[in-house]
Amino acid sequence: MTYELYYWDGIQGRGEFVRLALEEAGADYIDITRQSGRGRGTGAMLSVMRSDSEAHIPFAPPFLKDGDLIIPHVANILLYLGPKLGLAPDDEGLRYVVNGLQLTITDFVAEVHDTHHPIATSLYYEDQKEEAKARSADFIKERIPKFLGYFERVLQQNPYGAKHVAGDALTYVDLSLFQIVEGLVYAFPKAMSSYRSKYPLLATLHDSVEHRPNIARYLKSDHRLPFSTEGIFRHYPELDMEAS
Amino acid sequence: MTYELYYWDGIQGRGEFVRLALEEAGADYIDITRQSGRGRGTGAMLSVMRSDSEAHIPFAPPFLKDGDLIIPHVANILLYLGPKLGLAPDDEGLRYVVNGLQLTITDFVAEVHDTHHPIATSLYYEDQKEEAKARSADFIKERIPKFLGYFERVLQQNPYGAKHVAGDALTYVDLSLFQIVEGLVYAFPKAMSSYRSKYPLLATLHDSVEHRPNIARYLKSDHRLPFSTEGIFRHYPELDMEAS
């Protein structure tokens, strides 16, 4: 069965965390909104969300359809796919650890979004630019070190070694952390300029994911869209500054 | 085995979503930071978080300890406890639906927090009051209707009936929605003044949870702390206004 991924067309966004897992596993999937035809395109996504008869409507994209099952939220999709794609630990307890780590990434991604939209998602960036500067300054000073420092510690304290965040094998959280680093380096190049010396284990993990054959092939493909100021991670030079 | 809940003392906060599930089920648990003695108190919580040897350190409270397993994040704790407490569907697919609904609540709670802290968690409310007014105005105009309207639709479209958000029996999401309504009515009484006519199914769900015997007993007990301007839901009159 082909997995159907529903997410906004034209950006990496939150959908990218799911795509990286599907690509790493070489899974059979389609990006519904990037195709045309019956049951495809952005209209098909919106009609699921707006359905007045569907039993399990998602609040927002991304969501995954696997047969009749509709699964919303990145962490939930990865929880579901992880064991099927060989990207979750066999140990059941460790799966809750992995889910917890992914949920910390979820929180961090929401904070990344709010660096450019601190007041209202319904307003343009230009209408909240001053507040965005204040929020980004705090984000660079307090939040990047808090989150990246936490993941560095998680790697350091993994009893199976620092190559992965949990257990002795690759999980979807490792892939998501690659994306976090990629996104931050794009959005905040000055703030991230010395991240390799501050978070060496995270940098090593990032590089190891980047060079995995399926990931490397995907990153070079047309299917990997570039970062842009339409996505979650946005580069606005006026929001970036050297980390202290 | 007694469940150990770790969360900041003195507030309901995010820990309350977990407490409601434990209380409804009559589970054996202790609130570690509200007790004193060896391995108890806020110090005990911080020492888990700051440990440099613990394999699975949480990013933030709340977290649950069940034996050696440490489980962070509200939705993750409820995912773990749900089946054990009889508060999750038997059907595996429906468990992902329920988890997705809880994650939408997670996102909403983060937005509730940001109504009073739109710029920085590290600053006082008083230092971001003007921005908080702007964010709260958008929250009342756009976000409350979007989220509550969504849950009203979910109840409406549940093929098993509108008494519960998923399936034909109480789940932890129903309990969390009770808490969402309680918190919003406390924090934004003007904005919520007509919520019963706008979201009648949600109001009915709220009332049915409130009158469940174990919940009613808990709400009357000393263990249920009052809402306050230290928690997630805060009542600052200057942030509240009638919904349009």
Image (tube, coloured by chain):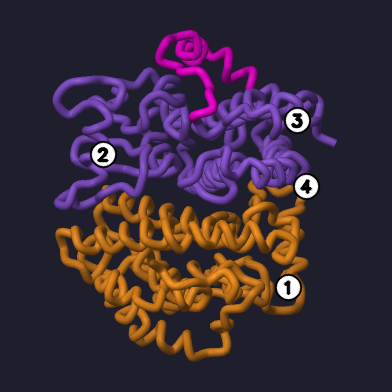
Chain colours: A orange, B purple
Q: Secondary structure at mark 1?
A: loop
State the residue at coordinates (51%, 18%). B226
State the residue at coordinates (29%, 23%). B30
Mark closer to the chain start, 3 or 2: 2
**Residue marked by disc 2:** B46
Real-space Cα distance between discs 1 and 3? 37 Å
Real-space Cα distance between discs 3 and 2? 37 Å
Q: Secondary structure at mark 3?
A: loop
User: Mark 1, mark 2: which one is toward the viewer?
Assistant: 2
Q: Amino acid at mark 4?
A: Asp
Could you tell me if residue B101 is visible in this image? no
Q: Are marks 3 and 2 on the same chain?
A: yes
**Chain at tag 2:** B
**Chain at tag 4:** A
* In the foreground, A51 or B110: B110
Q: CB atoms at circles 4 and 3 under 8 Å apart? A: no
Q: Which residues are magenta?
A: B206-230
Mark closer to the chain start, 1 or 4: 1
State the residue at coordinates (34%, 21%). B27
**Residue marked by disc 3:** B191
Could you tell me if residue B161 is visible in this image? yes
**Residue marked by disc 4:** A52
Real-space Cα distance between discs 1 and 4? 19 Å
- In the rendered view of the protein, which quadrant contains the C terminus of chain A? bottom left
User: Mark 2, mark 4: which one is toward the viewer?
Assistant: 2
**Residue marked by disc 1:** A41
Real-space Cα distance between discs 4 and 3? 26 Å
